[in-house]
């Protein structure tokens, strides 16, 4: 679990801020959505953050967890070398991670000088990516299971050299997949204009009717 301690609400008006915030820190009177939008960056996050599925935030003044979010991915903050932005979704009541932490005391391990800490949690697990059914709380696989899953797939093709030749051929597009010769179809309401210029180049303009 990634844990971030928030300072008190501080006005911000930096025109180069990639999050275009008007404040950062915990706004006690502000909607939680706004607090999430204003505090998901720009943090110095280590490699472990990429393996975490959830982030919880505490407010330093009350030593309580004030919000939780599921992490989709962590991206580089544009124009902020070494800083990261968390992309994800705020959790609400009913989600096990929200219900376990939000409103509770800040975890003891997070009472550190550094606002960014990590701790092991047994809430909000997901199933191992290999399909073995084991619940895990960090990363995508039980340690070693990604190797097993990979080698099972290699064995379906043959030896490792067989697999590499097969993969390179598929990746280069030499082996058409079943649907690739069928073309693609698109259904929508609106208009299509096809313009052919004197040099033979064609332009297709698609104008969907806006849904009301
Ligand atoms: Zn597994």
Image (cartoon, rainbow, N blue to C red):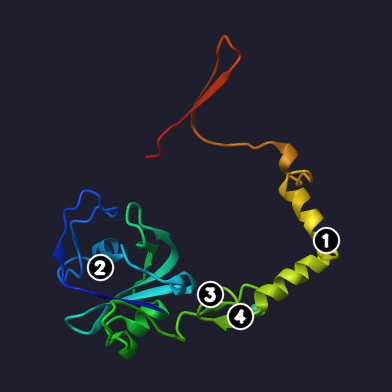
Q: Nearer the viewer, residue 100 or 201?
A: 201
Q: Nearer the viewer, residue 181 or 211?
A: 181
Instruction: Give residue 46's quadrant in the image.
Output: bottom left
Q: Residues within 10 Å of mark 1 (few under 14, many from 20)?
A: few
Split into quadrants, the picture shows ligand 1 in the one at bottom right
SS for dot 1: helix
User: Of the residues under marks 2 and 4, which one precedes in the sequence?
Assistant: 2
Residue 74 screen position, x and y as percent: 42, 63
SS for dot 2: helix
Classify 94 as above or below 37.
Answer: below
The label number, if any, that marks residue 32 in the structure image: 2
The label number, if any, that marks residue 139 in the structure image: 3
| Mark 4 CB near ligand 1 (8 Å cut) | yes
Residues at marks 3 and 4, CA–CA distance in whole angstroms: 8 Å
Q: Mark 1 sits on what residue? A: 161
Residues at marks 3 and 1, CA–CA distance in whole angstroms: 29 Å
Residue 88 screen position, x and y as percent: 40, 64
Q: Residue at x 76, y 46 (%)?
A: 178
User: Of the residues under marks 4 and 1, which one precedes in the sequence?
Assistant: 4
User: Of the residues under marks 2 and 1, which one precedes in the sequence?
Assistant: 2
- Residue 14 seen: yes
Q: How crowded is mark 3: few (under 14 residues within 10 Å), some or many (20 or more)?
A: some
């Amino acid at each position: 679990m990634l844990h971030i301690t928030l300072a008190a609400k501080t006005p911000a008006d930096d025109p180069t801020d990639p999050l275009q915030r008007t404040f950062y820190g915990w706004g006690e009177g502000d909607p939680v959505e706004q607090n999430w939008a204003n505090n998901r960056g720009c943090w110095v996050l280590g490699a472990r953050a990429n393996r975490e599925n959830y982030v919880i935030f505490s407010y330093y003044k009350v030593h309580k967890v004030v919000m939780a979010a599921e992490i989709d991915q962590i991206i580089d903050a544009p124009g902020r070398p070494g800083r990261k932005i968390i992309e994800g979704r705020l959790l609400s009541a009913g989600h096990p991670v929200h219900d376990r932490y939000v409103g509770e005391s800040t975890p003891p391990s997070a009472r550190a000088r550094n606002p960014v800490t990590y701790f092991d949690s047994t809430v909000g697990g997901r199933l191992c990516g290999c399909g073995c059914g084991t619940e895990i709380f960090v990363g995508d696989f039980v340690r070693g299971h990604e190797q097993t899953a990979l080698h099972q797939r290699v064995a379906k093709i043959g030896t490792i050299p067989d697999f590499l030749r097969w993969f390179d051929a598929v990746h280069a597009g030499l082996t058409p997949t079943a649907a690739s010769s069928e073309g693609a179809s698109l259904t929508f309401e609106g208009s299509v204009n096809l313009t052919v210029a004197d040099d033979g180049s064609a332009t297709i303009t698609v104008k969907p009717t806006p849904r009301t």
